[in-house]
Image (tube, coloured by chain):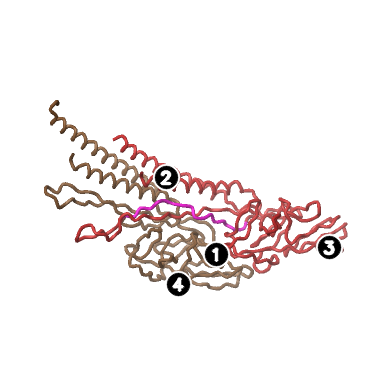
Chain colours: A brown, B red
């Protein structure tokens, strides 16, 4: 049988992987701060053997995430923040600093500012602790102020969130869904990054785009299957010509 | 089988859970002192199917790798402890906390429960109890023949007995408690929360001092559920569920195509 079946198979497998990426994006259509994963295909010509270079296999790759901003959702919580425009919030992970756009924070029993998943939020000078009987307020520049609930005129500046803005091509999404610098180094603080408090940023998944991508991927897959069937028919016809009983 | 089937399944699961949370909020839209909950989502782990920088031939390396995400998951339900509306009832034993703090309730198991539901009653022994019959802590006794009962902003409870308005009897003082992290409290049902390691230990004090809200007699605190917001959440969850079910259908059709080849 012609090696066409292997080329078609590589196309079908490519569609299947692309479908997995699209399904992940659709599953995260309501995850705060989620950045849609991009999918791209690349031709890999089969070289080395004799004959004409007519065969090119396909390789599926994820060149990174779509960095466009998501929709701002008003929640009214003091500890919810969204990054305006470009920029990232910093959190601590066992493997160093990581960056996220999901600004739905909590305080734990010790007053430590944490993310919803329990990771410690990184300030410019380390973690931020809100004293007891205080209400936290996060300013436009990331300044965290603790306001005495009893006496609202009394407020203490607890610290400042570490806001960074590295170039998109320096960032990559880790296996935990958080972003880190490709170099592995911590990013520089950028004073120009601004926040909006009282709301969170939604997912930037464009469901229409993903749905259209999914349909097109499905049709692409169907085409590859059709090619496999054609290859089989060709092979059968060739066999019947060779058959003595034809 | 196809990865995308399982990925889309996590999306459908998450959205179903979201609808569960939304419907719980909506069903408690009239519950005294109820605080609304919100499901918190996170993307699940990514699988590294091909490392960026890996060799694509002897001389070249791949500029980008292949990472495939495995879907979404609910990581927490976060309770929003914002103030509910204060509804006037004029009942002398209805109390609402205006600001931070919880009433303390002696639970039958000997521990203390915390609640924002201030619709209290008097039981047959004259003790002030909540709607489930559990005593307010510290316990307060209403004497026989009480004609009127007054709860001050600072929680001081006094009674006028046998119409003797000139000599009201001091019954005691209601103390309220705050937590550094109220969303860490565990919900017991019956409008009662319990202390956990995440909420921290309670700070008990006199209402109206040290950041504790004042007690308003004749009011109950209504639920802080915002029906419009819940409806929007429900629509969003429904559509996201449909999108994920569409992904399941598509993946299934691709598999079916293979099966009938």
Q: Nearer the viewer, residue B39 or A155?
A: B39
Say whether residue A38 is visible.
Answer: yes
- Label 4 environment density (alpha carbons within 10 Å; few <14, some 14–19, many ≥20): some
Per the rendering, the mark at residue A186 is none
Q: Circle 3 sits on which residue? A: B169
Q: Residue at x 40, y 71 (%)?
A: A189
Magenta stretch: give its range: B66-83
| Residue under label 4 | A124
N-terminal of the two: label 1 or label 4? 1
Task: Please identify the dominant SS of the magenta region.
Answer: strand
Work out whether residue A141 can be spotted: no
Number of numbered discs on residues: 4
Parent chain of label 1: A
Q: Residue at x 60, y 46 (%)?
A: B27
| Mark 3 surroundings: few (<14), some (14-19) or many (≥20) residues within 10 A | some
Q: Give the residue at x 72% y 65%.
A: B154
Q: Earlier in the sequence, mark 2 or mark 3?
A: 3
Q: Are marks 1 and 2 in contact (CB under 8 Å)?
A: no
Number of the front mark, 2 or 3: 2
Residue at the image point whose x is 55% and y is 66% from the top: A136
Could you give the CA–CA distance between mark 1 and mark 2, rounded to whole angstroms? 34 Å
The disc label shown at residue A108, or none = 1
Report the front residue among B150 and A105.
A105
Chain ID, mark 4 = A
User: Do the residues marked 2 and 3 share a common chain?
Assistant: yes
Q: Quadrant of the C terminus of chain B?
A: top left
Q: Pinpoint residue B109: horizontal percent, then vertical percent.
A: 69, 56
Label 2 to label 4: alpha-carbon separation? 40 Å
Per the image, the residue denoted by label 2 is B244
């Amino acid at each position: 049988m012609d090696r066409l079946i292997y080329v078609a198979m590589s196309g079908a497998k490519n569609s299947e992987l692309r479908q997995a990426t699209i399904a992940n994006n659709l599953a995260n259509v309501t995850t705060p701060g989620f950045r849609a994963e991009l999918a791209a295909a690349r031709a890999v010509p089969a070289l080395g053997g004799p004959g004409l270079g007519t065969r090119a296999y396909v390789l599926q790759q994820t060149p990174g995430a779509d960095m466009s901003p998501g929709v701002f959702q008003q929640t009214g919580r003091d500890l919810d923040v969204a990054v305006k425009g470009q920029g990232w919030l910093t959190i601590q992970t066992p493997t160093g600093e990581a960056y996220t756009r999901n600004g739905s924070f909590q305080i734990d029993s010790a007053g430590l500012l944490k993310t919803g998943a329990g990771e410690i939020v990184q300030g410019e000078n380390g973690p931020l602790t809100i004293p007891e009987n205080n209400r936290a307020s996060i300013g436009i520049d990331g300044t965290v102020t603790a306001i005495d609930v009893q006496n609202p005129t009394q407020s203490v500046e607890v610290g400042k969130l570490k806001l960074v803005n590295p170039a998109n091509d320096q960032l990559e999404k880790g296996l935990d869904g958080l972003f880190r610098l490709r170099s592995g180094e911590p990013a520089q603080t950028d004073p120009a990054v601004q926040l909006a408090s009282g709301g969170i940023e939604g997912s930037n998944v464009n469901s229409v785009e993903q749905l259209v991508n999914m349909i097109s991927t499905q049709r692409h897959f169907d085409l590859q299957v059709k090619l496999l069937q054609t290859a089989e028919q060709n092979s059968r016809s060739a066999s019947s010509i060779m058959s003595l009983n034809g | 089988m196809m990865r995308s089937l399982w990925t889309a399944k996590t999306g459908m699961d998450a959205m179903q859970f979201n609808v569960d949370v939304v419907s719980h909020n909506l069903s408690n839209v009239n519950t005294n002192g109820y605080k609304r909950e919100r499901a918190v989502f996170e993307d699940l782990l990514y699988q590294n199917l091909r490392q960026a920088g890996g060799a694509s031939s002897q001389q070249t390396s791949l500029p980008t790798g292949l990472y495939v995400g495995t879907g979404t998951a609910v990581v927490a339900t976060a309770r929003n402890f914002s103030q509910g509306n204060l509804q006037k009832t004029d009942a002398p034993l209805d109390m609402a906390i205006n600001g931070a703090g919880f009433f303390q309730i002696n639970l039958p198991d000997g521990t203390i429960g915390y609640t924002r539901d201030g619709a209290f009653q008097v039981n047959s022994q004259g003790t002030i109890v909540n709607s489930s019959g559990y005593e307010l802590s510290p316990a307060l006794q209403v004497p026989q023949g009480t004609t009127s009962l007054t709860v001050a902003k600072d929680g001081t409870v006094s009674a006028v007995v046998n119409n003797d308005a000139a000599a009201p009897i001091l019954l005691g003082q209601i103390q309220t408690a705050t937590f550094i992290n109220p969303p860490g409290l565990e919900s017991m049902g019956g409008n009662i929360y319990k202390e956990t390691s995440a909420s921290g230990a309670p700070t008990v004090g006199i209402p109206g001092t040290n950041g504790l809200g004042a007690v308003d007699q004749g009011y109950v605190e209504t639920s802080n559920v915002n029906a419009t917001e819940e409806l929007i959440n429900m629509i969003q969850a429904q559509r996201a569920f449909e999108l994920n079910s569409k992904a399941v259908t598509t993946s299934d059709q691709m598999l079916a195509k293979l099966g009938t080849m």
